[in-house]
Amino acid sequence: MIVTDVTRMYGDRVCVAGYIEDGSPIRPVCGHYGPTEAWLRPDSEAPVVPFTLVELDVGNMQRAVTAPHTEDREVPATGHQIIRTLELKEQMQWLDRTAFPSIGAIFGARIYSDDDTQWGRFVRVGEGVRSLGTIRPMNLEWLDYSQYDGSWKYRLRFLDQSGEQFRLTINDLAFRRRLDELRNSGQPPTAAATATLSVLQRQEVFLRVGLAREWKNGCYLQITGVYGFPR
């Protein structure tokens, strides 16, 4: 499996996604709770991170799987091994190969908006053909890194290739940690966001976009990976 997404859920629970040998997208699920951060460290020398190639036993699609989360596959909680990490050129080639022309094309379903805000975007449970995909954004407009109700928010406003504007929460674990490290080093949050966005705007950027689990009206869109490469 080529890992493309590692995101934060809650507690020590994480969400991992990627592609197996035949090109099928999968989201490994183990037990009633996993994977957890412990699953990300099968080897004390190196963790499972985006673009690591992992050897693991992949089971059948979960019986309780419901569209649009069609990628859930059962895996053991232990026994997986890290083979290597893809080179930068390989990473970019893989993202380009899996890219969709727009956000809407990823899910194969109508994207709805919350009544009280233009930014809450979701797909209804039972609709759509997939819950994960890649896009090349046309324009990165704004990165929000701020505290609200005691927790830190990470949100990106951008245009996809169709020209539609989105502002989505970023759940990319590594991306969040990089912003937190800048803040912990003494940089004001706004300055950390501005500097990070400035770097991304000079790069060739791919976004991994996925659907969260069901909540309220449906499954909400979120950014599961932010990857920039030198032009």
Image (cartoon, rainbow, N blue to C red):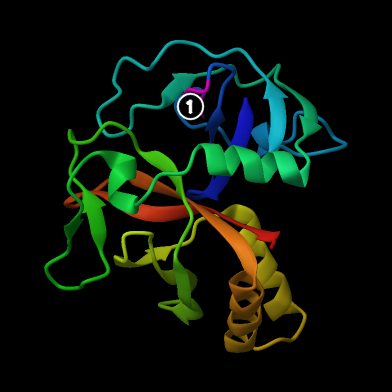
**Would residue 174 appear left or right of 104 to someone viewing this image?**
right
State the residue in front, 38 or 26: 26
Placement of 221 over or under 195, stated as above or below = above
**Can residue 197 be spotted in the picture?**
yes
Q: Secondary structure at mark 1?
A: strand
Q: Quadrant of the N terminus?
A: top right
Residue at the left extreme of this rendering: 115
Q: Main secondary structure of the magenta part?
A: strand
Q: Which residue is mark 1?
A: 26
Residue 204 image offset from top left, x and y in percent: 61, 61
**Can residue 15 be spotted in the picture?**
no
Residue at the right extreme of this rendering: 45
Q: Residue at x 27, y 69 (%)?
A: 119
Placement of 103 over or under 201, stated as above or below = above
State the residue in front, 60 or 138: 138
Placement of 188 over or under 10, stated as above or below = below
Q: Which residues are magenta?
A: 23-29
Query: Which quarter of the picture shows residue 69?
Result: top left
Placement of 45 over or under 220, stated as above or below = above
Residue 155 image offset from top left, x and y in percent: 45, 70
Magenta stretch: residue 14 in it?
A: no
Q: Residue at x 17, y 64 (%)?
A: 114
Q: Residue at x 64, y 73 (%)?
A: 202
Residue 89 image offset from top left, x and y in percent: 74, 44
Q: Amino acid at mark 1?
A: Ile
